[in-house]
Image (tube, rainbow, N blue to C red):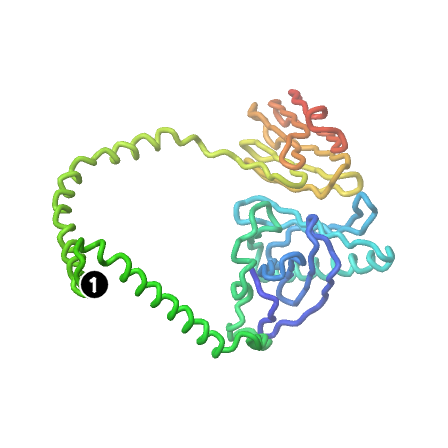
Amino acid sequence: MGSIYLNNNESIILSTHNVVVNAIPAEAILTNQRLILVDSRHTQLRPQDIPFTALETVTIGDSSTMDPVLSLSLVMKDGTRHTLGVVFPRDTKAKRMGERDEWAVKLKEAGVDAQREHGVQPTELAPPWVPGEIPEEAGEPGKGVGLSDEKFRNPPRPPRKPRAGSSPVNRTAIAAGLAIVLIVAVVIGVYHFAPSLVGKGGTPATPVPTPVVTTAATPVPATTAPTAVPTTPQPTVTPGVTPAKTPAPQTNIPHSGVWMRIEYNGKFIASFGTAGRLRDVSGSGDQFYQIPAKDEIVDATVQKLDDSGNALTVSIYNDGRLAKSDTTTGPHGTVDLHADLRIAPAASANQTIAG
């Protein structure tokens, strides 16, 4: 995570408070050292820092509602690529398009300069920027931004003054009243129940020691309890059973957004996206790529880079449900997908074998 407090020698280049990042209302701040995203819905949630060394591509386009869009492809530590779609909702289209283009130019320059000096360095994203639950501590005061760090030059906020109605005198009076009520209840209990505990009509002061003696004698039979301890060696059997039932790890399909999954035990190249907003990538293994689209037509073309007969499978998922999938086993085989997300997944999903 990050902090909205600036580091030493850090200055703000651009900032905006009216953007939508992957359907999340947000604020964005661009400094000479990082990109900062702030969730507008959760004021206590710590900001997300995005280092320039993790920026793979920066592209521009328009959303289905013709709002200007800025797409950022980030290199993740697990080897995947994650896309952040930054939408600039229109009030005046020409103004927001110019704002988007300025952000794109500044981000490209920052990414090239940082990677020329330090190379590509993967990063990590936390919810809500990736699927997952938002940490509970995000809503607790005092667990957000670290205000006491000396490297931040901005001063912390002053502590809140106590409310006028909650004075120490009132709290002391309330505590004293509760103590008096408790003492009166104890006296009444001793007066009513002490004679019944003793069983005699004598003075109530003498029976007090007798209950103490009886309670001291009761722990003596507890010496028989250790005899039951040796009879419980059975829990050692259960650890041997549970490992046998653990299945192989399963891949979690993201539950929100549009994703393309490529499964191939070898190298491949791919081109995917919507009309006018195609993205080119290369990779190997089991990879997920997010597509900034909603209720649109998604196209994907994936080709094997070797002449093996291994299966190449390409799948499009919409909000966790399979929209379309295709497989090829031919040498240098190609999979072409055309998924209409306006159609229900059950009606549009199919699987074929391509040569």
Quadrant, the N terminus: bottom right
Label 1 sits on residue: 204
Q: Tell which of 176 and 18 is nearer to you.
A: 176
Quadrant, the C terminus: top right
82 to the left or right of 61: left
- Place residue 339 in its image quadrant: top right
* Type of amino acid under label 1: Pro
Q: Tell which of 172 and 296 is nearer to you.
A: 172
**Residue 341 locus on image (x, y percent):** 74, 33
Which residue corresponds to the image point at 52% horizontal and 57% vertical from the top-left?
Answer: 137
- Can residue 189 be seen here? The reply is yes
**Residue 265 locus on image (x, y percent):** 53, 31
Provide the secondary structure element on which disc 1 rests: loop
The correct choice, above or below, for 154 with respect to 131 in the image is: below
The correct choice, above or below, for 246 with respect to 200 in the image is: above
- Place residue 275 in its image quadrant: top right
